[in-house]
Amino acid sequence: MLVVLNADYKEYCATATSNGMEYILGLDAGATKTSSVITDKSGTVLGRGAAGPASLISSTEKDFKINVKKAIDAAIVSSGKDIKQFVAAGFGGAGIDTEKTYKEARKMLEPIIDLVDKDNLVIVNDTQLILPACSDSGYGVAVIAGTGSNFYGKNKEGEEAGAGGFDYLLSDEGSGYWVGLKVLHAIAKSEDGRGKKTVLEDIVKDHFSVYSIRDMMDIVYEESFKKRDVADLAILADKAYKDGDAVAESIFEDTVDEIALGINTVIGKLNMQDEDIDIVAVGGMFNSPYPLKDNIMKKITNKKAEFIICKKDLAEGAARLAIDLI
């Protein structure tokens, strides 16, 4: 559901035009990076910016504010225009799933965005940026399989539904974190004989420069070893798969099952089994040498669906939502 903030903002963006042109701001803040775009009301991109992560889940409030502001500043510089005001803005962030997280996002954005009309600021979960960014139809299913995973859909009637998105303790199936955790479990079982031998043992030991898998305990249980570090291990599964490792291939087969389950769940909730829809996916998991897309499509209940790997900046989807609002 789109959430429009009805509050006055104080320091960075508000309503109006600059030099006769109306500017739109779009922001996508995630666990890996924050991206921004400035467009005109037709959606033409005038400037782009990027900064570090601004996730409600994994970033500190200080880092959130700093990186969002840096991303906006960079987009303004990139545009080459003297922009002091935005007529509307859209913000999409990982972890904005509940009333509590929405209120947290609103509070954290207040010192950053105040030059946007109080009725023209949209705050949503980042899954809601995917369809407007990469699908002309405006309905279908959006998939995130990056550091975390999430599934969102919208049908022709405007009804919305989701699946997953409960973060790493409750879900994140099919994500980089989920695959990375399976890699860690696989090497432990391989090392002590509880599971199949896998080349992932040697690959992980080389990656961390450790002598044995037991030495990994000194790394993974450090407070500094975070969700992102686990997700980064997904690329080691890619390497093992290319080496023909059966355990790595099994991990990817399970990944296909989980992503297809999330998509099919949303399709079922919205009764889109027999409609022409787009399934639009983003995230680093789709950069794997394993043919995720093709194998996922074999398991999708809607045989009319088109699977699209979105290459656009999701900040464009945030700007599109802001344009639709006005």
Image (cartoon, rainbow, N blue to C red):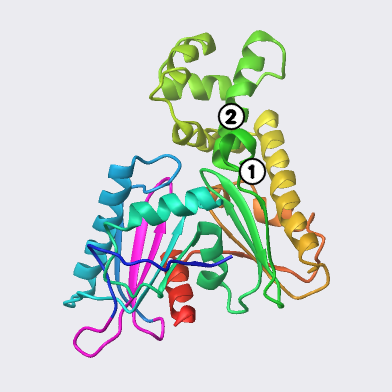
Q: Nearer the viewer, residue 88 or 190?
A: 88
Give yes or no for contact between labels 1 and 2 (Cβ–Cβ under 8 Å): no
Q: Nearer the viewer, residue 176 or 66?
A: 66
Q: Where is 193 relative to 97, above or below?
A: above
- Disc 2 crowd, CA 10 A, few/some/many (<14, 14-19, 20+): some
Left or right position of 275 against 28: right
Q: Confirm whether the magenta stretch covers residue 25.
A: yes
Say which residue label 1 marks.
174
Left or right position of 14 against 320: left
Quarter of the image where the N terminus is located: bottom right
Measured as percent of width and height from the top left, residue 188 is found at 61, 16
Q: Secondary structure at mark 1?
A: loop
Give the residue at x 42% y 25%.
225
Residue 181's mark? 2
- Residue extending farthest front: 7
What's the residue type where badge 1 is placed?
Gly
Q: Which residues are magenta?
A: 16-43
Structural distance between the alpha carbons of marks 1 and 2? 11 Å
Q: Confirm whether the magenta stretch covers residue 141.
A: no
Measured as percent of width and height from the top left, residue 45 is found at 35, 77
Give the residue at x 64% y 59%.
152
